[in-house]
Image (tube, helix red, strand yellow):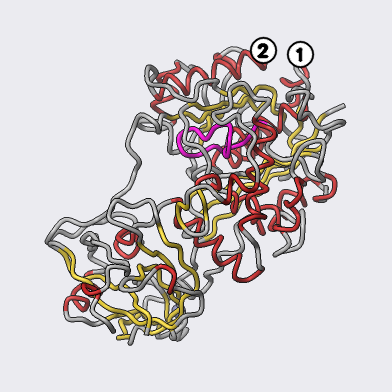
């Protein structure tokens, strides 16, 4: 990929530090190491998002963290134009494991986004917080 | 227990203000309550049930009951489902009345979003664990707003069904045709499809004129038992059916942004009322954005899924012109959207239509059955849906 700094037409956005809870801490600790975790249930076998202690499908407590390559396709998106820091894209990515993830699409021009496009996770640093997952076209 | 015919809407009041720099939020709630009581011909001591949602300040119901000096309340409910709350509360009030828990219920909404900053944020503090909404850390960081989360629904709807910006624009056009006759409407100018699609892009594919207005103000309703209704001098609006449903991303595996909770709340309400979409003469449809209306019309069964664009085109929502007159007060798109959630105004205009008290230019002839539907929260993440069906009692 072309470096974002060299491309004034691509979207960038300062993302605030996420709120970290006792339940989400393992996710953010892994994010600090560049790993994208999702949760899977050992009882029903399904992966879910966002990660929860109890499976939202079968209510089992046997949910486990699983490292994901963070690959998927854009389900939908919108480019927010009313932003003091320039346009930014929000949207959902349907991961190859199944669940859809709300995220930002950065490092891409607004007109280059499309539903069905393949994307991959990338971590973006935040001020005083763990890095957060964003997605970029592959 | 079915609520069909067990309760009546006997009082309705919409606050005339759209900008309220000199009034407090509790004051607006109370002024709406007073207006609805006067409309019904009742006093505050008649109120024995109170219903409100998250816009009620302080401890919600407790603060407002104390502020208004309601001495006889023996039943209360402050369920919060955003803008759909007030439609849900009419259903809950009817249930409570049917069970004998109260006989005169008051529902209020009011706020001053033009004076106060938008709610927002949810970002973390360094090195500190928080315990807020479970989704906050995973979602709030991405700059989601009402605009771009509803826009995501519009984008997907266009992708799946070929819906166009011009079709969405017809919804604003229809609302503006109605608003020209409402002296209180925030926007009174009639607009064209071109005006809408040429207005500034806010969040693709929604333009400025696809969005509702932001106003101060509020409204209130009085729901009573059949016995109390009989003793009053106002036309009787009978509650026929009510349905409610929450919807969210469902663990990420049920994400479907082209359907709303109306696919569940609608059939519950229609089933209880014993009527079909084709029986509805007038519809108040929550209109935070044009796409909100389009999806609700499909989900409530007024047209096939994916055919909403064709359904609303050519002015089919305009009273006197189209097949389904909607939001004849101008709705949230043109009239008002107090406290960023206009649900109660949906019921108020339906009551006016059923009483024959809507503006003569927009009054639906022989309006005997009306539907009101609310969507609260965000269609793009998690929202509540509530449907209400009402009938004019001859
Ligand atoms: Zn499970």
Compared to B88, does B301 lie above or below? below
What's the residue at 13%, 59% (across, down)?
Answer: B126
Q: Mark 2: which secondary structure? A: loop
Q: Which mark is residue B41?
A: 2
Instruction: Give the extent of the magenta segment.
Output: B329-344
Q: Pointer 2: residues within 10 angstroms few (<14), some, or many (20+)?
A: some
**Is residue B283 magenta-colored?**
no
Query: From the image, which quarter does the C terminus of chain B lie in?
Result: top right
Q: Is residue B342 magenta?
A: yes
Read off the chain for label 2. Answer: B
Host chain of mark 1: B
Secondary structure found at label 1? loop
Q: Quadrant of the N terminus of chain B?
A: top right
**x and y percent of residue B73 in the render?**
52, 24
Q: How many marks?
A: 2
Question: Would residue B310 be found to the left or right of residue B68 on screen?
Answer: right
- Tell me where residue A103 sits by quadrant: bottom left
Quick one: label 1 or label 2, which is nearer the N terminus? 2
């Amino acid at each position: 990929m072309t470096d974002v700094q060299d491309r004034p037409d691509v979207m960038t956005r300062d993302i605030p530090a996420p709120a970290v809870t006792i339940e989400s801490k393992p996710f953010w600790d892994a994010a600090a190491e560049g790993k994208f975790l999702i949760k899977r249930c050992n009882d029903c076998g399904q992966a879910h998002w966002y990660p929860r202690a109890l499976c939202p499908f079968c209510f089992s407590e046997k949910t486990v963290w699983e490292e994901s390559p963070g690959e998927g396709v854009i389900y939908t998106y919108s480019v927010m134009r009313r932003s003091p820091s320039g346009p930014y894209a929000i949207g959902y990515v349907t991961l190859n494991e199944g669940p859809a993830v709300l995220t930002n699409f950065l490092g891409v021009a607004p007109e280059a986004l499309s539903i069905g496009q393949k994307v991959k996770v990338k971590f973006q640093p935040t001020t005083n917080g763990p890095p957060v997952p964003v997605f970029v076209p592959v | 227990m079915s609520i069909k015919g067990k309760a009546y809407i006997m009082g309705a009041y919409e606050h005339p203000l759209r900008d309220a720099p000199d009034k407090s939020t509790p004051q607006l709630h109370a002024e709406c309550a007073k207006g609805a009581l006067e409309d019904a011909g009742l006093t505050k001591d008649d109120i024995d049930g109170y219903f409100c949602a998250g816009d009620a300040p302080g401890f919600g119901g407790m603060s407002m009951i104390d502020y208004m000096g309601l001495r006889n309340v023996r039943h209360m409910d402050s369920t919060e489902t955003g803008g759909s709350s007030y439609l849900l509360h009419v259903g809950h009030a009817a249930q409570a009345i049917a069970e004998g828990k109260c006989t005169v219920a008051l529902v209020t909404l009011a706020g001053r979003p033009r004076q106060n900053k938008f709610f927002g944020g949810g970002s973390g503090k360094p090195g500190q664990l928080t315990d807020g909404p479970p989704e906050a850390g995973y979602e709030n960081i991405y700059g989601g707003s009402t605009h771009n989360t509803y826009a995501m629904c519009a984008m997907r709807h266009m992708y799946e069904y070929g819906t166009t910006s011009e079709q969405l624009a017809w919804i604003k056009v229809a609302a503006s045709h109605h608003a020209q006759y409402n002296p209180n409407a925030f926007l009174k100018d009639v607009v064209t499809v071109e005006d809408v699609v040429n207005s500034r892009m806010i969040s693709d594919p929604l333009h400025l004129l696809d969005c509702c207005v932001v106003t101060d103000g509020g409204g209130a309703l009085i729901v009573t038992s059949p016995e109390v209704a009989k003793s009053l001098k106002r036309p009787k609006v009978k509650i026929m059916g009510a349905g409610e449903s929450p919807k969210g991303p469902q663990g990420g595996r049920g994400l479907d942004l082209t359907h709303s909770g109306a696919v569940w709340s609608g059939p519950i309400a229609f089933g209880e009322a014993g009527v079909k979409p084709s029986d509805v003469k007038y519809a108040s449809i929550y209109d935070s954005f044009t796409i909100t209306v389009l999806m609700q019309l499909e989900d409530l069964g007024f047209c096939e899924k994916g055919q909403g664009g064709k359904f609303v085109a050519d002015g089919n929502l305009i009273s006197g012109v189209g097949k389904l007159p909607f939001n004849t007060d101008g709705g949230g798109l043109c009239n008002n959207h107090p406290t960023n959630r206009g649900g109660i105004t949906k019921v108020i205009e339906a009551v006016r239509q059923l009483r024959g008290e809507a503006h003569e230019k927009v009054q639906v002839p022989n309006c005997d059955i009306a539907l009101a539907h609310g969507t609260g929260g965000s269609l793009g993440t998690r929202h509540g849906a509530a449907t209400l069906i009402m009938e004019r009692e001859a």
